[in-house]
Amino acid sequence: MDYIPHIIDAEYVEDYRIRVRFDDGSIKLVDLEPYTKRGGIFEPLKDKDFFKKFFIDLNTICWPNGADIAPERLYEIGKEETIESSVK
């Protein structure tokens, strides 16, 4: 991937999904449930209240316990949303 995506904004949607807006104008719905099954540093993400505490730091989605997911990965696994689908 030559393009290195930059996260403009991210918001919690439901379950383990977040909507991420990137600097190229794309909006992607990212389902992070598989990460909750990895254990280790991602174990606390199973608790939805903890999951919702994500924040953006240095262009990366992070959690208070040090877990993070790179923007390149979020861009890769996210499902592109159109304006119509994001206004449901």
Image (cartoon, rainbow, N blue to C red):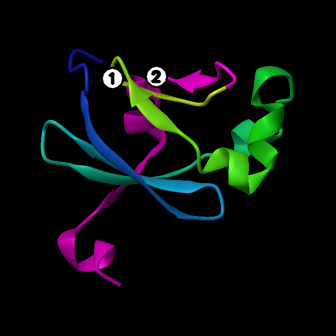
Which stretch did the figure color magenta? 65-88
**Which kind of residue does numbered mark 1 sit on?**
Asn
Which quadrant, please, contains the C terminus?
A: bottom left
Whichever of labels 2 and 1 marks the residue nearer the N terminus, that label is 1
Which element carries disc 2, helix, strand or loop?
A: loop
Which element carries disc 1, helix, strand or loop?
A: loop
User: Residue 79: x percent and y percent?
Assistant: 41, 54
Residue that extends furthest to the left in the rendered view of this protein: 24
Q: Quadrant of residue 58?
A: top left
Q: Nearer the viewer, residue 51 or 29?
A: 51
Residue to which mark 2 is pinned: 70
Label 2 close to label 1 by CB (< 8 Å): no
Whether 34 is among the magenta residues is: no
Q: Residues within 10 Å of mark 2 (few under 14, many from 20)?
A: some
Q: Is residue 48 left or right of residue 82?
A: right
Residue to which mark 1 is pinned: 59
Residue name at image x 72 percent, y 43 percent: 34
Whether 18 is drawn above or below 5: the answer is: below
Q: Nearer the viewer, residue 65 or 77?
A: 65
**Which kind of residue does numbered mark 2 sit on?**
Ala
Residue name at image x 25 percent, y 27 percent: 5
